[in-house]
Amino acid sequence: MVVHTDLNLLSVLEYAVQVLKVKHIIVCGHYGCGGVKAAMGNHSFGIINKWLRNIKDVYRMYRDEIETLQDENQKVNKLIELNVQEQIMNLAKTSIIQRAWKHEQRPHLHGWVYGLENGIIKPVCEMEAGSPIDPFYIYDNI
């Protein structure tokens, strides 16, 4: 999953947090994801390139760590885990989440990766309400 400033996605997030008062949000990727594998290459996929670019950004940020792995599947799966972590952080950077954290001490953000081969869910990160993020991203007027 890629979480970014897409207006439709933010509208859904705002409704879930402000109206439905959700207590938990899960970002769940899956091992062997073809989209992540595609993002690691240079082939153009047309309009999907915009979506893949966000994953490419995560790859660029963690390239040195990913490239220490020998096996191509390990590299893809590592990027999947890192992408989930970054998307959780992207959620935490939104004013929607920050407002709910500040005023209502919720929601709890969960980053998981699902194993298609074995059905096992691997938790890769969590952020409880008020978890620290870089002060550069914190809104002071919410």
Image (cartoon, rainbow, N blue to C red):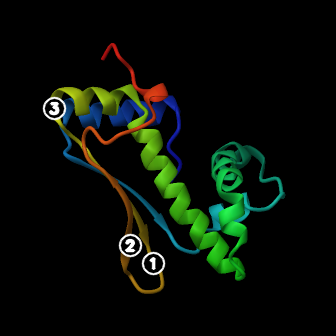
In the figure, 47 relative to 74: above or below? above
In the figure, 56 relative to 116: above or below? above
Question: CA separation, marks 2 and 1?
Answer: 8 Å
Q: Residue at x 47, y 79 (%)?
A: 116
Q: Nearer the viewer, residue 102 or 30?
A: 102
Residue 104, numbered circle:
3
Task: Give, as a three-letter code, the residue at label 1.
Answer: Gly
Q: Residue at x 24, y 41 (%)?
A: 129
Q: Residue at x 70, y 73 (%)?
A: 68
Which quadrant: the C terminus? Answer: top left
Q: Secondary structure at mark 2?
A: strand
Q: Residue at x 71, y 52 (%)?
A: 60
Task: Give, as a three-letter code, the residue at label 2.
Answer: Lys
- The answer to whether mark 3 and mark 2 are in CB contact below 8 A is no
Q: Secondary structure at mark 1?
A: loop
Q: Circle 1 sits on which residue?
A: 115
Crowdedness near tag 1: few (<14), some (14–19) or many (≥20) residues, C-alpha within 10 Å: some
The mark nearer the N terminus, 1 or 3, is 3
What x and y, as percent, mark residue 98? 32, 30
The mark nearer the N terminus, 2 or 1, is 1
- The answer to whether mark 1 and mark 3 are in CB contact below 8 A is no
- The answer to whether mark 2 and mark 1 are in CB contact below 8 A is yes
Closer mark to the observer between disc 1 and disc 3: 3
Q: Is residue 110 left or right of residue 94?
A: left
Task: Give, as a three-letter code, the residue at label 3.
Answer: Glu
